[in-house]
Amino acid sequence: MNTNLPTTVRAAGGTNAAAVLADYYELVKPSIVWLILMSTAMGSYLAADGALPAAQTLHALFATALLAAGTGALNQWWERDVDARMRRTATRPLPAGRVPSRSALVYASGLTVAGLAYLFVGVNVLSFWLGVCTVVSYNLVYTPLKTRTWWSTTLGAFPGAVPPLMGWAALRGSLGIEAWVLFGVLFLWQFPHFYAIAWMYREDYARAGIRMLPVVEPSGRSTYRQIIASSTLLVPLSMAPAWLGMAASWYVVPAFLLGCAYLAAGVRLAKSGTAGDARDLLRASVLYLPLLYLFLLVAKP
């Protein structure tokens, strides 16, 4: 190998390689992967009887990370033409032409299959089937329906709430009411979060032909009702871990206060309809979930 290449050529090659890696990393939607892993880890932590089994938990997290990365990349591959019509997504690797479509599909499929295989071999059968249901419902139901009906948001919330079930199933091999409470919390949390984004970017969604609720009904009345209803239901459901023995009794206080703050941000948006209040609701959603998980972490008996 010739190591006497000019420094500028070697630097350019290194920069190009780094850019390619960055594009493939962006394809997996890393911020969503981290959220999924956080929820999966919380499910495992609360399912553990005593100390958290490190090896078993790491197997579950690694398999879930592969599956989440593959699912996110498949979603970007599927929506590459739609993303090209939206200002906020037009610079993503696929619509911008930085990653070939066929390469992205192979990459995404490989990650997805690897994640499912790892769940089956390294975790357990229940986790594997939860993974299969997630891939099918997210990529074959939710994603194609986004351009057809606003109900896609509700349908997409089901696979979006599966991560704590994955973590729980990895340790218990079964799903009890406690696991379904965690599922319900994550399910309801998604509606204010995603409708805040949809309200801020409703013109972009309309341009791309995505039938989000703020696009279908520009007045926002139904969007506001969805936000307020889901955040209202979230308040008592988020307190349920204390009643089920998953958390100490004092946990109900921070859970109640966090839920009320989340609801208040939604009410402010419903009253004003401004992009600024939608952005505040989005910030509240980003803070709510890790704070709730933190209190669950500390309050576990």
Image (cartoon, grey):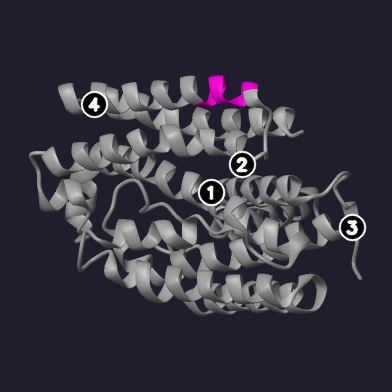
Residue flagged by tag 2: what amino acid is it? Leu
* Residue numbers of the magenta segment: 250-255
Could you tell me the amino acid type at mark 1? Val
Query: Could you tell me how far apart the alpha carbons at marks 3 and 2 are, in whole angstroms?
Result: 27 Å
On the image, numbered disc 2 is attached to which residue?
244
Say which element carries label 4. helix
Residues under labels 1 and 3: Cα distance?
A: 25 Å
Q: Position of residue 101 (x, y in %)?
A: 47, 75
User: Few, some or many C-alpha atoms within 10 Å of disc 1 (few <14, some 14-19, many ≥20)?
Assistant: some
Choose the circle earlier in sequence order: 1 or 3. Answer: 3
On whether residue 254 falls in the magenta region, the answer is yes
Q: Which mark is residue 55?
A: 3
Three-letter amino acid code at the position of disc 3: Ala
Amino acid type at image mark 4 = Leu
The correct choice, above or below, for 169 with respect to 280 in the image is: below
Quarter the C terminus occupies? top right
Using residue 17 as the reference point, say whether residue 148 is left or right of it. Answer: left
Percent coordinates x, y for residue 33 in the rendering: 60, 52
Label annotation for residue 181: 1
Number of other residues with Cα within 10 Å of mark 2, as a class: few under 14, some 14 to 19, many 20 or more: few
Examine the rendering and report whether any part of residue 215 can be seen: yes
**For discs 1 and 3, the disc positioned in front in the rendered view:** 1
Q: Is residue 220 magenta?
A: no
Q: Provide the secondary structure element on which disc 1 rests.
A: helix
Quarter of the rendering containing residue 156: bottom left
- Few, some or many C-alpha atoms within 10 Å of disc 3 (few <14, some 14-19, many ≥20)? few
Say which residue label 4 marks.
269
Mark 2 or mark 1, which has the lower sequence index? 1
- What's the residue at 62%, 74% (across, down)? 112
Q: Are marks 1 and 3 in contact (CB under 8 Å)?
A: no
